[in-house]
Image (cartoon, rainbow, N blue to C red):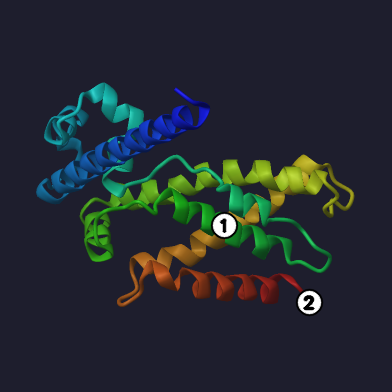
Amino acid sequence: MTAATSDAVRTVTISHRERKRARTWTAIHLAAADAAARHTRLADITVEAIAEQAEVSPRTFFNYFRSKEDAVLGLSSPVIDDAIADGFDFAPGDDLVEKVAFLLLAVFRTAASRREIGYDEYIALMDRHPELARRRFQHIDDVEAVVAELVTARLADGGPTPGNTVHDTADMIVTVAGALMRSALRPLLTAPGKTEADADSVLRRTCQLFREVTRP
């Protein structure tokens, strides 16, 4: 077998494995969402029941999701796409908080981009089970932890850290940016006619309001 043939076989094998993982992820997510739609309380739903409906083992369930809430919402562990990371840096005159707030939003979207249910159904499930909405916002903590690493690295590369350590500066920027993103996302769960597509404009207005309130 030539090196080229070996590489081709490896590519097909990886592709098949990725497709299988995607199918399993979707099966678990849809089974969890279906269970949440049929039950009044999430407490009445077990991981074992979700796994059985998805035709996987409970062990496999936890290979894909950390909790049944994450499975219902279709939340994956947040990671920063290479393209996003490569394109993120600080330039003179940047509004650091706003720039990091939009980075948080981009990573947050990536972590929930594979959701297989419609937005209206998604909102209805959070209305039916308030703990799902709480988990969605808690997920921002996970996103912040990942983003903080990138922000720290960029500040260490020469970003502005006036009178503070790189870590302290990064922590402050990410904390404030995370608060603004939470403020921007909250009305999207309750305002009639709003969708996730409105997040950019809402976040931009939220950042503008923050500047007006905090700067003389």
Instruction: Judge left or right: residue 138 versus residue 37.
Output: right
Give the quadrant of residue 117: bottom left
Q: Is residue 175 above or below residue 12?
A: below
The amino acid type found where label 2 is placed reads Pro
Q: Residue furthest front?
A: 2
Which of the two residues, 215 or 107, is positioned nearer the viewer here?
107
Residue 67, given in percent of the width and then of the height, sits at 32, 34
- Identify the residue shown where x is 40% and y is 33%: 14
Residue 107, given in percent of the width and then of the height, sits at 52, 52
Answer few, some or many: residues within 10 Å of disc 1's Cα (few below 14, many 20 plus, some between 14 and 19). Answer: few
Residue 167 appears in view? yes
Residue bearing mark 1: 179
Residue bearing mark 2: 216
The amino acid type found where label 1 is placed reads Ala
Give the quadrant of residue 190: bottom left
Q: Residue furthest right?
A: 163
* Residue contact at pointers 2 and 1, CB within 8 angstroms: no
Which of the two residues, 133 or 7, is positioned nearer the viewer here?
7
Residue 66 appears in view? no
Instruction: Judge left or right: residue 177 versus residue 185.
Output: right
- Identify the residue shown where x is 57% and y is 62%: 180
Residue 111, given in percent of the width and then of the height, sits at 44, 48
Q: Quadrant of the N terminus?
A: top left
Give the quadrant of residue 69: top left
**Between discs 2 and 1, the one toward the N terminus:** 1
Which of the two residues, 3 or 176, is positioned nearer the viewer here?
3
How many numbered circles does the render carry?
2
Mark 2 element type: loop
Mark 1 element type: helix
Instruction: Judge left or right: residue 94 versus residue 48.
Output: right
